[in-house]
Amino acid sequence: MRQVPKKLKELWIKLVHENDSPNQIAAGFAIGFFATFFPIPVLDTAAAFVIAWMLGVNKSSCLIGNNFVLLIYPVIPLLVGIEFCVGKWMLHESIAFHVPKQWNISYLLHESWPNVRAFLLGGMLLGTPSAIASFFGIRSAVGRWQKSHSQKKDGPPLKVL
């Protein structure tokens, strides 16, 4: 856990040194962060990257946002459980998770659909406010950082006599 502050600092340095506006950096981060709430591990990264590319926002901040949750890895099973429970609750279904004796395509296509639907709905319901909050937080922080560091680079303002 001692590595987490060091990794956060490294990610922050990568974010603020991008040559994009705070809005583009924050939008990329928010898209990536939103995608982490979906239970399909590799496709969420690919989908987030494609969406960031299509919208023309910062793609590296998208990948940082998408992988940000890995810094708090022990929380991921709890997050997935909460997504499932929220999804089941919103669908008015009982929170029962049946583990099959055999995994096959038939089970995945027919029997697991209620669980997949609950995961997707829960991910969307938890991911949307999280992405919105991350957008405003990152935009504000990057904007302040860029403003303070552009003044240092340019020097103090000239006084008019």
Image: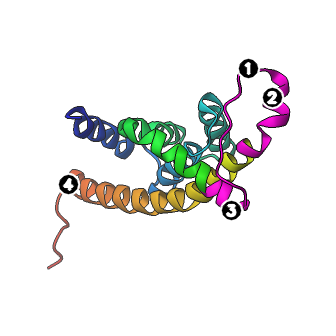
Query: Which of 91/96 is in front?
Result: 96
| Cβ atoms under marks 1 and 2 closer than 8 Å | yes
Q: CA distance from mark 4 to mark 2?
A: 61 Å
At x 61%, y 28%, the residue is 42
Q: Residue 132 location, x and y as percent?
A: 53, 62
Type of the residue with mark 2 = Tyr
Q: Which residues are magenta?
A: 86-115
Q: Secondary structure at mark 4?
A: helix
Count of number-bearing discs = 4
- In this rendering, the answer to whether 157 lies above or below 44 is below
Quadrant the N terminus occupies: top left
* Label 3 environment density (alpha carbons within 10 Å; few <14, some 14–19, many ≥20): few
Query: Which of label 1 and label 3 is nearer to you?
Result: 1
* Quarter where residue 72 is shown: top left
Q: Secondary structure at mark 3?
A: helix
Q: Which residue is mark 3?
A: 90
| Cβ atoms under marks 4 and 2 closer than 8 Å | no
* Label 2 environment density (alpha carbons within 10 Å; few <14, some 14–19, many ≥20): few
Q: Which residue is mark 2?
A: 107
- In this rendering, the answer to whether 33 lies above or below 40 is below
Q: CA distance from mark 1 to mark 3?
A: 29 Å
Q: Which residue is mark 1?
A: 102
Q: Is 98 one of the magenta-colored residues?
A: yes
Left or right: residue 51 compared with residue 153:
right
* Label 1 environment density (alpha carbons within 10 Å; few <14, some 14–19, many ≥20): few
Type of the residue with mark 3 = Met
* Quarter where residue 136 is shown: bottom left
The furthest residue to the bottom: 161
| Cβ atoms under marks 1 and 3 closer than 8 Å | no
Q: Residue 138 location, x and y as percent?
A: 41, 56
Q: Secondary structure at mark 2?
A: helix
Q: Which residue is mark 4?
A: 152
